[in-house]
Amino acid sequence: MHMIAISNWASAAAIWFILIVCWERLVVIRYPLKARKYRLFSGRIIIPANIVLTGLLTFYSHFSYDCFIKNFCNGTQPHALCTFIGDDGL
């Protein structure tokens, strides 16, 4: 289940990285002589901030599912059934 949560985190971070790059390129195209003026933060701040903020936003994925695992064929084939914790069984 944690691999699904980590892939969700990586997906969210990638989406925000793409938006940041597109925004920066848009500013450079629209204002070529003033591009440095519109740059609010350096890459040393944006990249870690993006990773931390998307990690905080997707952290619930580690705890929102309960997985039941059963092994078949002498423990060589694990099968899991994951259910949402907030589900009342309706």
Image: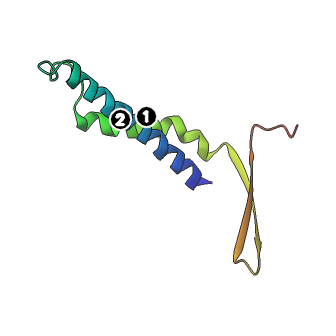
Instruction: State whether residue 30 is above or below residue 77.
Output: above
Q: SS at mark 1?
A: helix
Picture residue at 22% right of the left edge, 32% below the top = 42
Picture residue at 38% right of the left edge, 31% below the top = 19
x%, y% of residue 22?
32, 31
Check contact, mark 1 vs mark 2: CB within 8 A: yes
State which quadrant residue 88 falls in.
top right
Q: SS at mark 2?
A: helix
Q: Nearer the viewer, residue 64 or 79?
A: 79
Horizontal side, residue 27 vs residue 78: left or right: left
x%, y% of residue 1?
63, 54
The amino acid type of the residue labelled 2 equals Ala
The number of callouts visible is: 2
x%, y% of residue 3?
56, 55
**Is residue 39 visible in this depiction of the protein?**
no
Q: Residues within 10 Å of mark 1 (few under 14, many from 20)?
A: some
Picture residue at 59% right of the left edge, 39% below the top = 60
x%, y% of residue 50?
38, 36
Q: Which residue is mark 2?
A: 49
Q: Which residue is mark 1?
A: 53
Q: Nearer the viewer, residue 28 or 44?
A: 28
